[in-house]
Image (cartoon, rainbow, N blue to C red):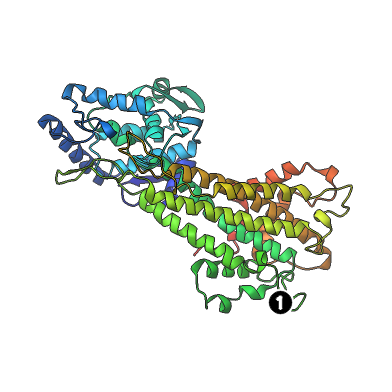
């Protein structure tokens, strides 16, 4: 992907990730320019005629009854940014800020916001030159969109606030100057157009959704490796079982596992060694599949939102100005809560499979997957750490969207908490990734205990095993390693795509 061209309508999640993380260049489609300019012409006309229009010739929020004169209009917009930038906490990471800017631009180019093309181009240049505003991660209710964090995004455009440039945190004006960008003076409606929308919450949730999709695939790989380590029963994955309860995620998971272990001599059949496997193995299609279905739904909602007009008021092409609620985060709050639940369940079931691998009472492996337990603790505390993460996820998975707190003198009397939902989901995906990395590492250790029996892995699982063993070795004795470093190496293989790419050269892993 060399370039992403924005027209406000067809941005994909994959393109968003490419811009946010790979710094792919962005352009505005020629077809969008006329719509932006016509929308601005309508706003200029409103100002000239001194019509009463929210956010253009009035104050904001509960101050919507206060009229603003033409002379005060520009100052109103700057004041809006200065006073709304009151976020708190650690800065959003670079990829989430870049995704935020991209989504905001894509909303503005739809031509419903009344902003000047020159201001949109400044935001575009910041993205392409990687001027990264310092945006504290906390402070949004997901109500009138992400007012506080988006105000921080705008500050450097005005020569205010702070921004990163070439990896250095600078005063906003200095960052803009070093990038060769001019400071903007906002006019009527523009401050509101820049900060009234769901861009931050959607950016955080969109990247978490992308990562969760990869996590779902990696969970199937981890589960397949655990199946082989335990000499699991393949019968529970037969298609003829799942077509009579044809949830898409269940069918996809069963197919993935069958294909990942195809050709394996570790895999068994019913009554060959045992009659049934425990649920964490046998019910992978149902458990992993349910989460696939949930996260596929979230992706659908994300791709609607990143192509939506979330400003207020909306300037229609026929000249109507409609004050509504497209900025409200509720349509994304519930999906992002569901994203967190789905990612938490992947971590939950993966941790149970880790326990089965390290617990000698539940397997025929030596205690804690080490040849000489006692002097060696082996994988004992890897399960502790995974259990800690799984339990933390259970707390984080409590839905944010069921909460609300009134603001702006009760004008904004029902808010979405969608940004909190997105941040929680991101943290859950982060935690569950480590649990799945732990399972992959433990399963490879278990498989090595059976190597002497002369068996071979499936085509997909062999590819995953080979990548892991290039990075880390079989754990013979505790004195030979620092286990944290080994876990970090395997986690890195999940993050950089090494395991997934190697496996997908052999087996296409499906989500739906």
Query: Which type of secondary structure does the marked residue at label 1 adopt?
Result: loop
Quadrant housing residue 41:
top left
Quadrant housing residue 38:
top left
| Front one among 415 and 22 | 415
- Residue at x-position 81% and y-position 60%: 360
> Residue 50: x and y, percent?
12, 30
Q: How many marks?
A: 1
In the figure, is residue 107 to the left or right of 207? left
> Residue 403: x and y, percent?
44, 45
| Neighbourhood count class around disc 1 (C-alpha, 10 Å): few under 14, some 14–19, many 20 upward | some
| Front one among 402 and 369 | 402
> Residue 39: x and y, percent?
20, 40
The answer to whether 482 is drawn above or below residue 458 in the figure is above
- Residue at x-position 79% and y-position 52%: 474
Quadrant housing residue 155:
top left
- Residue at x-position 24% and y-position 30%: 59
> Residue 90: x and y, percent?
52, 31
Can residue 224 be seen by looking at this rendering?
yes
Task: Find disc 1 in the rendering and name its residue.
Answer: 269
Can residue 493 be seen by looking at this rendering?
no
The answer to whether 317 is drawn above or below residue 167 in the figure is below
In the figure, is residue 196 to the left or right of 466? left
The answer to whether 228 is drawn above or below residue 144 in the figure is below
In the figure, is residue 110 to the left or right of 207? left
């Amino acid at each position: 992907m060399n370039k992403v061209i924005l027209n406000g309508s067809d941005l994909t999640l994959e393109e968003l990730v490419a811009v946010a993380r790979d710094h792919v260049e962005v352009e505005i489609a020629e077809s969008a320019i006329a719509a932006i300019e016509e929308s601005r012409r309508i706003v200029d006309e409103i100002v000239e005629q001194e019509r009463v229009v929210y956010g253009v010739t009035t104050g904001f929020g509960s101050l919507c009854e206060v009229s603003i004169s033409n002379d005060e209009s520009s100052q109103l917009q700057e004041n809006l940014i200065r006073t709304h930038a009151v976020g708190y906490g650690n800065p959003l990471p670079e990829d989430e800020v870049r995704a935020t800017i991209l989504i905001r631009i894509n909303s503005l180019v739809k031509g419903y916001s009344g902003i000047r093309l020159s201001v949109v181009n400044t935001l575009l240049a910041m993205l392409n030159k990687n001027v990264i505003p310092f945006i504290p991660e906390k402070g949004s209710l997901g109500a009138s969109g992400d007012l506080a964090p988006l105000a921080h995004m705008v500050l450097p455009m005005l020569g205010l606030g702070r921004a990163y440039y070439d990896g250095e945190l600078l005063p906003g004006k200095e960052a803009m100057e070093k990038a060769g960008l001019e400071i903007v003076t906002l006019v009527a409606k523009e401050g509101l157009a820049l900060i009234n929308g769901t861009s931050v919450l959607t950016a955080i949730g969109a990247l978490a959704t992308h990562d969760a999709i990869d996590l779902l695939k990696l969970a199937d790989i981890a589960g397949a490796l655990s199946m082989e380590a335990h000499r699991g029963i393949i019968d529970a994955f037969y298609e003829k079982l799942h077509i009579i309860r044809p949830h898409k995620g269940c069918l996809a998971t069963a197919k993935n596992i069958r294909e990942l272990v195809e050709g394996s001599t570790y895999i068994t059949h019913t009554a060959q060694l045992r009659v049934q496997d425990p649920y964490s193995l046998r019910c992978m299609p149902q458990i992993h599949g349910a989460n696939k279905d949930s996260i596929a739904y979230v992706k659908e909602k994300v791709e609607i939102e990143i192509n939506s007009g979330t400003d207020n008021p909306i300037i229609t092409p026929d000249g109507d100005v409609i004050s509504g609620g497209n900025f409200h985060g509720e349509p994304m709050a519930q999906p992002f809560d569901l994203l967190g639940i789905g990612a938490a369940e992947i971590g939950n079931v993966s941790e149970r499979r880790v326990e089965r691998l390290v617990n000698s009472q539940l397997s025929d492996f030596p205690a804690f997957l080490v040849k000489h337990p006692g002097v060696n603790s082996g994988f004992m505390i890897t399960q502790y750490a995974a259990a800690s993460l799984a339990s933390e996820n259970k707390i984080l998975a409590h839905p944010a969207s069921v909460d609300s707190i009134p603001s702006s003198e009760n004008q904004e009397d029902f808010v979405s908490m969608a940004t909190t939902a997105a941040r929680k989901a991101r943290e859950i995906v982060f935690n569950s990734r480590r649990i799945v990395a732990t399972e992959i590492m433990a399963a490879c250790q278990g498989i090595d205990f059976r190597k002497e029996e002369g068996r071979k892995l499936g085509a997909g699982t062999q590819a995953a095993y080979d990548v892991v063993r290039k990075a880390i070795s079989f754990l013979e004795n505790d004195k030979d390693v620092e286990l944290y470093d080994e876990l970090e190496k395997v986690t890195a293989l999940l993050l950089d795509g090494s395991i997934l790419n190697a496996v997908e050269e052999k087996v296409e892993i499906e989500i739906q």
